[in-house]
């Protein structure tokens, strides 16, 4: 859902699959303390789960 939302808004993104990239998974846990997905980093802010309103707040900053 997050990818579809980003695409619908015309926002560029880089997808990182933590299931296939153990180094990225470790970095994610170090930065956020969470392993749940999706996690989206926008302008330095982490969003856990699918939260379009919060995401758009950070896009506008």
Image: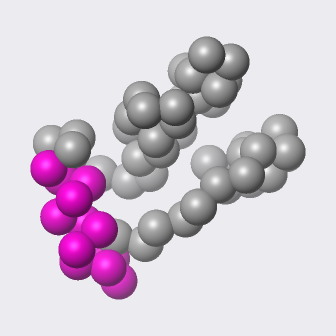
Residue 4 screen position, x and y as percent: 74, 53
Secondary structure, magenta segment, majority class:
helix
Q: Quadrant of residue 21?
A: bottom left
Query: Is 55 within the magenta?
Result: no
Residue at horizontal 52 percent and vertical 35 percent from the top: 42
Which residue sits at x=83%, y=39%? 9
Query: Residue visible at 43% across and 32% down?
Result: 44
Tell me the residue at 22%/74% (across/down): 23
In the rendered view, does 40 fall on the left or right side of 35? right
Instruction: Name the colour scheme.
Output: one colour
Rendered position, 57 above or below 41: above
Determine whether, in the image, residue 25 is placed left or right of residue 17.
left
Depth check: 61 or 18 in front?
61
Quadrant, the C terminus: top right
Number of labels in the image equals: 0
Q: Is residue 56 above or below residue 21?
A: above
Q: Is residue 49 visible?
A: no
Residue 16: % across, % down: 46, 67
* Magenta part of the chain: 19-30
Instruction: Please state which of residues 61 and 25 is positioned toward the viewer in this rendering.
Output: 61
- Determine whether 18 is above or below 30 in the image: below
Q: Left or right: where does residue 59 sit relative to residue 4?
A: left
Classify residue 28 by image quadrant: bottom left
Residue furthest bottom in the image: 20
């Amino acid at each position: 859902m997050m990818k579809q939302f980003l695409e619908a808004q015309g926002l560029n993104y880089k997808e990182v699959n933590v299931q296939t990239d153990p180094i990225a998974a470790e970095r994610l846990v170090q930065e956020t303390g969470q392993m749940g997905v999706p996690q989206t980093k926008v302008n330095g802010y982490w969003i856990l789960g699918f939260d379009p309103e919060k995401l758009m707040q950070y896009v506008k900053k």
